[in-house]
Structure formats: C-alpha cells, structure tokens
Image (cartoon, rainbow, N blue to C red):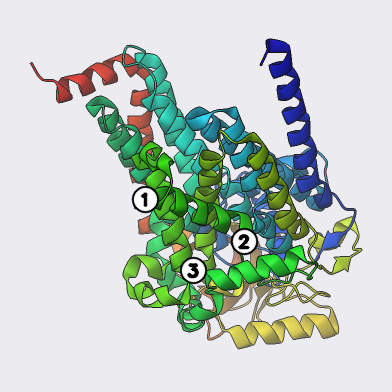
Amino acid sequence: MTKNQSLICTVIVVLAGIMLLGMAIRPLFVPHLTGTADGFAHKYRLVNFHQSLSEGTLRPRWAGNAVLGYGAPLYIFNYSVPYYLVDAFYRIGFTINTAAQIYAALTIIISFLCMYALAALLWGRWAGVVAGLVYTFAPYHLFTVYSYEAWGEMLAFVFPPLLLFLLFSASRTKPSHKIAIHAWFTTTIIAWVLFILTHNISSFITSPVIVLFGLIACKNDKIKLLYLVKIILLVILISCFFTLPAFTLTDTIKIPALLTKEIALRKIYMIPVMEQIKTSWSVIMGQDIIYKEFTVGIPIVGALFAGLFSLVFSRTRKQMNPFVLSVLGILMLSLFFVDPLSDVFYAFRPLQYVLYPYRFLFLATFAGSLIAGCLLRKHLLVGIFFVIVTVMAGYPFAHPYMDIFLFPRSFFSQPQMLGFAVPTLKTMGIAEFLPATADINFLVNEEQRYLTQGTLPEKFILPPDSGSVVRSSVKQESLSATIQAGRNLRLTVSTLYYPNWTASIDGKHVPISHDTFGRITLDVPAGTHDIRLRFGYSTIEKLGWSISAAGIVLFLLFLTYPRIIHEAIVKCIRPK
C-alpha cells in the first residue's frame, strides 16, 4: 500500500469513527428530562454540591438540602469527581440537564480514545479502532449512560484503559529515559486516585486487575517493578481521606440495613451468560429496553468464544502472551461473578461490598473489548463486520424506553424529598445515607405534611412561649441563629444529628444531642445568645486526611526530585 493509499484509508477510518461516535452521543442531547434510574438523584445531589462549593467548602460532605433540609452525610460515602466536573459546566451557564448531557458525552468520547490508545499501543491502530468502538457500543456501557445515567460508573469507563496505557507506556520506555519513566508513573498515580474518587465500587473491582497487568508489563525490569510498588502505596495513601471514612463509618448511617436487604436479593441481579445472549438478541430484534436488561452483549461473548477457540485450536495460540491470556481469564472470571453459580463466593468479605453482581459487567466489557481488538488486529474485513455487529447490538441501548418530563429549569431548586422526586416516581437515593439515629417514619410524615400543606419544617424550633429567633443563617455545613430566650430552654434544630456536628453558644463549645426523631437538640440558657453549629471532622476523617497529607508530601517529593528518586531506586535494586 502506497503512502497516499494509507493516508486515504486513515482518513476514511477517522471519519467513520467520528460518525459512529456521533451515533453513540447524539441521543443524549434532548431538550427534556428523561426518566433514567439515577439521573434525578444525581442532579438533586449536584444542587447540594454546587451550593457547598459556592459557600467555600472545597470538599463537600453534608447534603444540607436533602430530605426537606434535614440533611445527610452523603458525600462522606459517595464519590465526588463526577459532581466537580458537571458543576464546572453548570457554573459556566449551562442548565443542570445540559451540563449532565455534555458530561456524559465526554465520558463516551474519552473512554473511546483511551481504549483506542491502549489497543493501538499493544497491537496497532486497527486493533485500537476495533477495541475502541466495541468499548463504546458495548451494551452495558450505553446502558449505564442512557438507562441508569450512573454518573460515577460512566466516567469510570475512562480509567482502566487509561491506567494500562500509562503502565505499558512506562514499561516500553528505555531505562535511560529517566524523566519519561518518571512522568508516566506520576500520571498513573494521579489517574488511579481519580479513579477511586470517581466510582469506588468500579475501582475496587478493577484495581487488582490493574495491579496484575502492571506486574505483567514490568515483569522484566526490577526498577519499574519497584516504581509500581511505590505507585500502589502512594495511591492507597493519597486516597485515604475518602476511602478510610467511607469504609469504616458505615455504622453511622442507614446503609447496613440496605446491605442486609440487598444481600438477600442479590440473585435477582445475577444473569447467566445464556440469558445475557438472549437479552442482547431480543434487543437487536427490536425489544424495548427496560431497567434490568443487563447484558455484556453478543459481540463480547463472541470475542470470548473466539479467544477460547484460538487458545485451543488455532495456530495463533503461540502468539498469546501472558497479558492476552490474563485478559481472557479476567473476561471469563467477570462473567462468572455475574452468574448465579458464583453466589457462594459472595460470602467472602471483599465481595460483600459488591451489592450488585452486574457491576462485574464493567470489567467484562473492558476485557472483552481488548480481546476483540487483539484477535482482529490483522483482519480488516472481519473487523469491519464485527464493528457493524457491535453497533447493531449496542445502538438500541442508546434509545431505551424512557419517561419524558418537560419540567422548567427551576425544577431542581424545589425542596428535596426522601423517597421520590415529586411528581415523578424516580428515586432520590438518599435513604441509605441518612444518619443511623434518624427516624424514617417521622421523615415520611414530614414529607407528607409538606406535600399536603406546602410548609417546610422550621429550622430552629423553640418550646412555646419560651423566646424567639431574632435572625438565622442556614448553609450546607454550618447553621447560625441569634435567639432571645426568656428562660432556660431546649432548642431543636431541624437538621439530623450526626457525630460530626458541633455547637457553640456565644463562642463557647456546648454539647449537643438528638431527640427521638433524630433531630439535633441543645440546651440554651436564658438571655440573648448567638448559636452556631458546624459540621466538623470525625477522628477517622482526621486520620484519613493525615494519611493523605503524608501521601501527598511523598508524591510531591517524587514529583520534584525525579532523578534523585530514580537513583535511590536503582541503588535499592543494584547495591554496590
């Protein structure tokens, strides 16, 4: 093939790729709200997040508007990176809905580019095109975007190929290029931490696989292996400000009750491979897509069988290096953990954190896309056919059957409910994050009172004829009021008690408690007093931040003195 012919082919491939990416993201941009499973909950959460940032809280933790203003420690346990990104688009003037659409489109485009870059690095540009398009149009990927609108998981698709691209790029850099190696590994640390802060469950499932592939990539170079160990340690340290509280403070919220309930229902979310094939085929033939149509898709199952055939019968099995064999094994293992046969393994502690087994389809989609790119790297016509089948299998998932809501721009400014986003039946996804002392029945009654009478609970409640609230200020993570008390009284604050809350009267710290409904209470002496409440940090959070600070200091040293660090590592490996 001449240079001109090669250029023409490249241009055609690029144009076709742009057109196909357009097919994947075009259905996002509609003028109305769609009734996705999680979309309404995320957009209401964004309102709290946006307000906290506007008030100067750089790391929001308390959702003050949740449940009619009673609040919840949502962001201590929930990922944050997606909210920062969507908020950036919201701040420059887009509506919440449009900001979310732009964000979703970018996650699709960037995940394609990252998968293309990885497969192209390993096996050439055509493998990159195939793997990237399979990754983009994988049914589970588009299902996550269009049916569930899962902000964390849709961005999480970016990170597995990105991390492996960084690790393999570092492993292929000549040892003499010290600064380049250092730069690759430094970027890997940043990307890995962002992955954890983007979707904790996806990162929990995928990180062991990334470690395995990193070991394979660096297996022949002890220096790079030591770099990899350092990366893992720094990632663990830096992310502690989020992971340590998120995993150890769950007893302070309602989530253990959810765990008990969902564990009992786990088998509902397990789908055998044959059932997934049936679902994928039914969708291709025109069946409407509903919320629980979880499938990895016929193309990725086909890639699995083709990989197994090549391994057993084909002459190309000798070309399957440890990395390809590992990817094939990860694909099989991922599909197994979605199958009901794997239920017994969920009794083990680590897997108990994975409430919904279909989450392993995230990893299966990643591994299957790589296998497809590897197997079709030298087969242009077969690759084109495979991409066409992939688009046919995935494109319908960009057009699920959804309710349409023509709400005004101000819709997400209304009071936030406990159960559903009124007037829809879309879940708010907040109940499991309520403090453990909160009385759910009381909150349900408060919600009903608001819906029937239109009145929100007063923030500062005094006993009858005991005094008055002169002025008050309510922010996401701080409350204040000036109270004239005619006698000693007990003040009730319509904010749910959580151990982080601290109070002061006229600048002096005072103890707080909670009533039977879970609201904050404190004793106020007679007279005029300034009351202030602040959402502080628990001991576990302070410990997490201290560990993260130490990790950041080490990272900055790693970043500032690359040559010294590299020479120290060399001396550890090759002492005189």
Residue 288 percent location from the top left of the image:
79, 70
Near-viewer residue (259 or 62): 259
Measuring 42% from the left and 30% from the top, which residue is drawn there?
Answer: 168
Q: Residue furthest left?
A: 576
Residue 486 percent location from the top left of the image:
63, 76
Say which label, 1 or 3, has the lower sequence index. Answer: 1
Measuring 28% from the left and 20% from the top, which residue is drawn there?
Answer: 565
- The three-letter code of the residue at mark 2 reads Ala
Say which of marks 1 and 3 sits in front: 3
Confirm or deny contact between disc 1 and disc 3 (CB under 8 A): no
Say which label, 2 or 3, has the lower sequence index. Answer: 2
Quickly name the residue at label 1.
208
Measuring 84% from the left and 60% from the top, which residue is drawn there?
Answer: 33
Residue 410 percent location from the top left of the image:
86, 58
- The three-letter code of the residue at mark 3 reads Val
- Residue 231 position by quadrant: top left
- Residue 228 position by quadrant: top left
- Residue 42 position by quadrant: bottom right
Quickly name the residue at label 2.
63
Callout 3 crowding tier (Cα within 10 Å): few <14, some 14–19, many ≥20 = many
Viewer can see residue 166: yes
Residue 298 percent location from the top left of the image:
62, 59
Near-viewer residue (86 or 162): 162
Q: Specify the label residue 338 is tagged with.
A: 3
